Amino acid sequence: MIISWILHSISKEIAEIVMFRDTIDAIWKDLSNRFNHSNGPHMFQLRELATALKQRNQDINTYFTRLKVLWDEFAEFHPTAVCTYGAMEKLNDFYNLDQVLQFLTGLNDSYQPIRAQILLIDSLPNISKVFSMVIQEKRQHTLSTTTIYAIAAATSTSTTQPPRSKKPRPFCTHCK
């Protein structure tokens, strides 16, 4: 029954190759030998793309999303293990550190102040928190810049207008 299901799940050409195998194990080994290829070149390519990725003229969200897609695809090739002794937590901390450093390295130089602040933190936060910190800094910088321009515009328009002549205060002729 399982052999029938496998044979109907694969293409006709491949089924013709394995249909005369006696056991599921023999079919599986034959298919595995033919189609199970190393993921090394693909993993290398993903790592190379992630390492070379820089923010340049991309906005911060686009840059981070592209990095995250590469990291997630790369993570698909890592075996997952359950560990009750804390080793997995240490490994995850290492992966997080690697991602944080890679993200900060690719940022434009305009983010140097927030990069320096983050790197001074004893225990670096996870990549999502670091991304959030960078976004908040960007918003704060944008707000500060907008405020400075607004103040500059207000002061420049007030100095270019002629001074207002003072009007005399209203004076009541009845009670003085």
Image: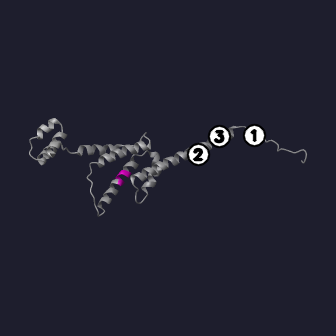
Q: Distance between the residues labelled 2 and 3?
A: 14 Å
Q: Position of residue 66 (x, y in %)?
A: 37, 43
Q: Which colour scheme is used?
A: one colour
Residue occupied by mark 3: 156
Mark found first going from the N terminus, 2 or 3? 2
Mark found first going from the N terminus, 1 or 3? 3
Q: Which labelled disc corresponds to residue 52?
A: none
Kind of element beneath mark 2: helix
Local crowd size for mark 1, using a 10 Å CA cut-off: few (<14), some (14–19), many (≥20): few
In this view, the residue farthest toward the bottom is 85
Local crowd size for mark 2, using a 10 Å CA cut-off: few (<14), some (14–19), many (≥20): few
Frontmost residue, 12 versus 129 = 12
Residue occupied by mark 1: 164
In this view, the residue farthest toward the front is 1
Q: What residue type is labelled 2?
A: Thr
Check if residue 172 falls in the magenta segment.
Answer: no
Check if residue 99 falls in the magenta segment.
Answer: yes
